[in-house]
Amino acid sequence: LRDFLLVYNRMTELCFRHCVCNLNYRLLTGREESCLDSCAARLVRANHRLMGAYVGLVPALLQRRAAEHGTPAGPSGLPA
């Protein structure tokens, strides 16, 4: 949960700094809003790709770690 919140906060700050250039109005302009939407969508897609790669690598990493420690790994890659 902490990591999720850190990623969310970084994404929010990055997109805000990139897209919002005028703080004189309470509401976002149409241009700022569309910039924020596309910025957030881009970062969410990138995060999903990274998580997909991570999920694909975890079983191999766990199996390698178990082999280094001499613990047999189960079928899911987790130590038995």
Image (cartoon, helix red, strand yellow):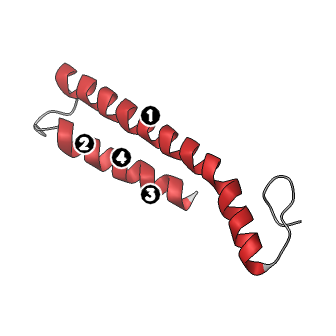
Rounded to the nearest angstrom, the CA distance separating label 1 from label 4 is: 12 Å
Amino acid type, callout 1: Arg
Numbered circle sitting on residue 15: none
Discs 1, 2 touching: Cβ within 8 Å: no
Numbered circle sitting on residue 45: 1
Amino acid type, callout 2: Phe
Question: Looking at this rendering, what residue extends furthest in the top direction?
Answer: 30
Numbered circle sitting on residue 16: 2
Rounded to the nearest angstrom, the CA distance separating label 2 from label 3 is: 15 Å
Circle 1 or circle 2, nearest the eye: 1
Circle 1 or circle 4, nearest the eye: 1
Q: Secondary structure at mark 3?
A: helix
Give the class, few, some or many, for how many residues have Cα within 10 Å of label 1's Cα (few <14, many ≥20). few
Looking at marks 2 and 4 on the same chain, the residue that comes earlier in the sequence is marked by 4
Q: Secondary structure at mark 2?
A: helix
Amino acid type, callout 4: Met
Amino acid type, callout 3: Leu
27 and 7: which one is in front? 7
Circle 2 or circle 4, nearest the eye: 4
Looking at marks 2 and 3 on the same chain, the residue that comes earlier in the sequence is marked by 3
Rounded to the nearest angstrom, the CA distance separating label 3 from label 4 is: 9 Å
Looking at marks 3 and 1 on the same chain, the residue that comes earlier in the sequence is marked by 3
Q: Position of 32 compared to 68: left or right? A: left
Vertical comparison of 47 with 80: above or below: above
Q: Secondary structure at mark 4?
A: helix
Image coords of residue 72 (percent x, y): 86, 69
User: Which quarter of the figure is the C terminus placed in?
Assistant: bottom right
